[in-house]
Image (spheres, rainbow, N blue to C red):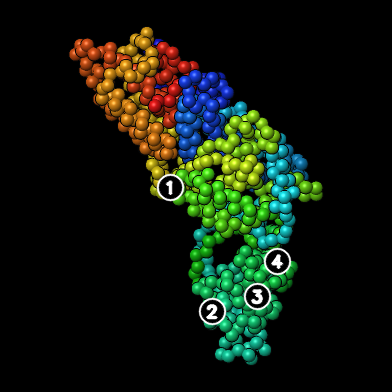
Amino acid sequence: MEPAKAYDPKTVEDKIYKLWEESGFFAPEAHQPRADNPNKNKSFTIVLPPPNITGELHMGHALNTVIQDVLIRKKRMEGFKTLWIPGTDHAGIATQAKVEKELRKEGLNRFDLGREKFIERIWAWQEIYGNKILGQLKKLGASCDWSRTRFTLDKEYEKAVQAAFLHYYKKGLIYQGERVVNWCPRCATSLSDLELEYTEEKSHLWYIKYLLRKDALRQTQGDDNFIIVATTRPETMLGDVAVAVNPKDERYKNLIGKKVILPLVGREIPIIADRAVDQKFGTGAVKVTPAHDLTDSEIGLRHNLKIIQVIDERGRITKEAPLPYQGLKIAEAREKIIDDLTKLNLLEKTEDYIHQVPKCYRCNTVVELIPSKQWFLKMSDLAKQAVKAVKSGKIKFSPKNFEKPYLDWLKNVRDWCISRQLWWGHKIPLDGVDDVLDTWFSSALWPFATLGWPENTKDLKTFYPTDVLSTARDIINLWVTRMIFSGIEFMGKAPFHTVLIHPTVLTKEGQRMSKSLGTGIDPVGLIEKYGADAVRFGIAYQLLGGQDIKFSEENIVMGRKFCNKLWNASRFVMLTSDVNDEPLTSDVNELPKCQIIQQLNQTIESVNKNLENYQFGEAAHTLYDFFWHDFCDKFIEETKNSAQGGSASGGKNQKLLLHVLLTSLKLLHPFIPFITEEIYQQLPIKDKKQSLMIEKWPL
């Protein structure tokens, strides 16, 4: 069959993907390993970082999918039992917020429906939209074993989550306690420190006079009858229980132990000394509000201070505050407090200040710190296990510099607040408890729960531990750390040997991609425009070791041109080949020791070395340069000239052409699988496999 004159991805990609799915070769059991295969009894496993069911494919997903698919396809061709496990995350906060938004369009909220009906509504939404992103991954060519697709709220996975919780609970690692937690007034739930996103905003630093009590004033030398406190949050002063200074600060040595009158409230509070106070911040004297600040909470515990909550779960001032401020929203209370302090001549001055404002990572609402009764997981021993796994070398980070943020976080880790005040998620499996578990509690079990744990399944024995985890740097501690200590705790082994931290994809101008800000780039649109292979190769071509990629569509255009070059060169080789040619790869040593074979061998060696070291961009550049310049521009052109000149070496060149083309297709297949498979299916060679994806990888 004569190949088409031009390559059209639109007519090829759906057809090829259907061929792959029908072949069953995405599953590790689907094809019998070759007798001469040294890897036939070895497995290679990757778990797909489960995208949220609210999500759509973005450039970060596309980049990570390309990386994982390159690794899986290469190992599959090397004869490993390869398993790439796909699935999605129920994404408690994000999904609940999404469905509540839909309800608001109908003039309803979740309380109108009640818990049971609301959960039914989310499941209905999930049925329609939940797997959209998995379909988009297929468009990109992901060779996951879709028969093993998992969802973090499916029934089997729920057994794993319950088993994990009860294990920790019986071991005494899970407890309930009242602590100051991050609270999102919009989502009405607690959040962990890792679920906050900080926004730099222009604000102020307010300097407020706290008047000394009269008898304290008589004992104090000097003319001032006040101490000045600097704060970025004057609204929380209504809950102050002390003023703190550093014990080494000579300016306030004589004031330690004295009393001041809390402005606007009239409550007497002490001046205390604590090492946590930064002498360089503001005046070196800070207000202490244990109910609404983590550092203040720790100071309060050390000094046995009272906790007075003046901000509630709705983000309004409580009845613990004086009457004029009760019920006000935080912004309203701040404005009134500043106005009242000014009238009383208690506001010394105001300075401009750049403030890092914590916001909910899902709804962008400013997060408040409030006391709340929550469930916690003790982290001390679990953290030590996670530290040991990396320091001992059982787990390696690539690039290695990402070990530091991992270890730094574990060094100072607090107990993990695992409860959330949501309706959508895994209910805490204790009688009378309505809270659900933090989404990351369930996804921490992903590398083994996807394989059937807590049952001792065949998959668990064969494919755990997994091999390489490829993920983004912003979830190292949200997810990677938690998977590591969970794997060690429940399986006795680290869940993977390598953590591959892929670059962050930025816009061409270096901005973070964001759909809401209009800076996002839709990879599905690029696939429609250029084809999946062009997108894959264009992405891989840019993976040159940096921590950020300034994405350029020019590289996708280059990928499309490269695919066209591959198609045209393959068409030339096929049109000049004899379908009855002897198999080319039966004995490579029979091929002449010519320059193109030497260049091909150098390319094979370089690509193997680069991929083993996760240098995907270098491998893509090597393949591009060899195929375009050495093979097409030089060898094919020389072959054409020989044929036109009537050279007797035509048959030899024809064998070389077919051998180099076939080997190139194998090397390129992990990067551009659709076009290489389409060409392979048309190659005029004997002993062809059912699919290029199970051909023998070049060595």
Residue 598 rendering spot, x and y as whole percentages: 29, 26
Circle 3 packing at 10 Å, graded few (<14), some (14-19), many (20+), is: many
Indicate whether 121 appears above or below 416: above
The mark lying in front, picked from 4 and 2, is 2
Comparing 147 with 4, the one in front is 147
The mark lying in front, picked from 2 and 3, is 2
Which residue is tagged 4?
A: 309
Instruction: Tell me which corner region of the image, top left, top right, bottom left or bottom right, holds residue 182.
Output: bottom right
Q: Earlier in the sequence, mark 3 or mark 1?
A: 3
Amino acid type, residue under disc 2 in the picture: Asp
Circle 2 packing at 10 Å, graded few (<14), some (14-19), many (20+), is: some
Marks 2/3: CA–CA distance: 17 Å
Residue 73 visible? The answer is no
Residue 684 rendering spot, x and y as whole percentages: 39, 13
Comparing 17 with 584, the one in front is 584
Q: Residue at x 44, y 22 (%)?
A: 696
Q: Earlier in the sequence, mark 2 or mark 3?
A: 3
Indicate whether 512 appears above or below 599: below
